[in-house]
Image: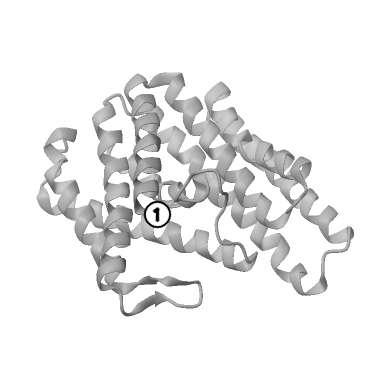
Amino acid sequence: MLKERLTSAALMIAVFLSAILVGGRVLSLTILLGVFICLYEAFSFSFQGNRNTTLILATAGILPSIGWLTCGLETACLAAMAGLVVVFGMTLWKIEKGEPADNLDAAVPMLSSIYAWIAGYGTCLLVAISQIEDSSKIIWFVTVVALSDTGAYFAGRSFGRNRLAPTVSPGKTIEGSVGGFFLAIVGGLTLAEFAGLQLGYGKIALLCAAISMMTQLGDLVQSMFKRAYDVKDSGNWIPGHGGLLDRVDGLLIASPLLLFLLS
């Protein structure tokens, strides 16, 4: 299982790293495709077995990103509103088709939260990356996110005793969370010179801690959605990992911090 997990992770890193190094439209389109896949997986929670509806919702979700890439921020805002209309319209359609009464209270906020989370943060990621000319900063940021996940995973497996959020995600532990913070900060400080960060060690450590915090929050948000819809993974096409959303949930939530690197 671990070998399969590491092999899949290495392949994903190779693809994303190649896109980062090429940069420009290739990187933007890679992120756009990733956001689309994540939205498809997330909306599949609620619309299980209805591929056409899920495709429509996922397409609506990438409208803000397409608007930003083609025409700028104003168009992205208009596209976001159009996407919300589609999401709420599909939700009403689902309810009218006979959604069980005990799920009605959760349907609208859950679907709109999925849309806002993935589409909004995905657009933020595109905006941030489009303004960074030095790819080393992007590599540094993604590496810190990955180190946070890795530290939390191995520390949780080795030392995990106390549950962090037993209702939302029983498998996550406080010890794992601490391991995530530790590895993110140590790795971020070690690689800061490579990325050309000139913030001082204290600020870099705080930035790494913030990235780890947001990354772990993304994991918990993803766990909340999966628990609400009683699914184990967002997909099954990445051996050892599940779906793409299972791997980039933290990256999406942490993406606004990329903008901090520009200031």
Front residue of 237/145: it is 237
Residue 160 x, y percent position in the rendering? 30, 73
- Quarter of the image where one finds residue 143: top left
| Up-down relation of residue 253 to residue 108 (above or below) | above
| Up-down relation of residue 55 to residue 220 (above or below) | above
- Quarter of the image where one finds residue 59: top right
Q: Residue at x 82, y 56 (%)?
A: 94
Front residue of 42/81: it is 42
Residue 34 x, y percent position in the rendering? 51, 36
> Which residue is outermost to the bottom?
162
Left or right of 259? Residue 37 is right
Q: Residue at x 76, y 50 (%)?
A: 49
Left or right of 206? Residue 120 is right
Circle 1 crowding by C-alpha within 10 Å: few under 14, some 14–19, many from 20: few
Front residue of 5/256: it is 5
Figure colour scheme: one colour
Element type at mark 1 = loop
| Up-down relation of residue 135 to residue 48 (above or below) | above
Q: What residue would you read off at disc 1?
A: 1
Residue 87 x, y percent position in the rendering? 72, 48
| Up-down relation of residue 113 to residue 69 (above or below) | below
Please, what is the three-letter code of the amino acid marked with disc 1? Answer: Met
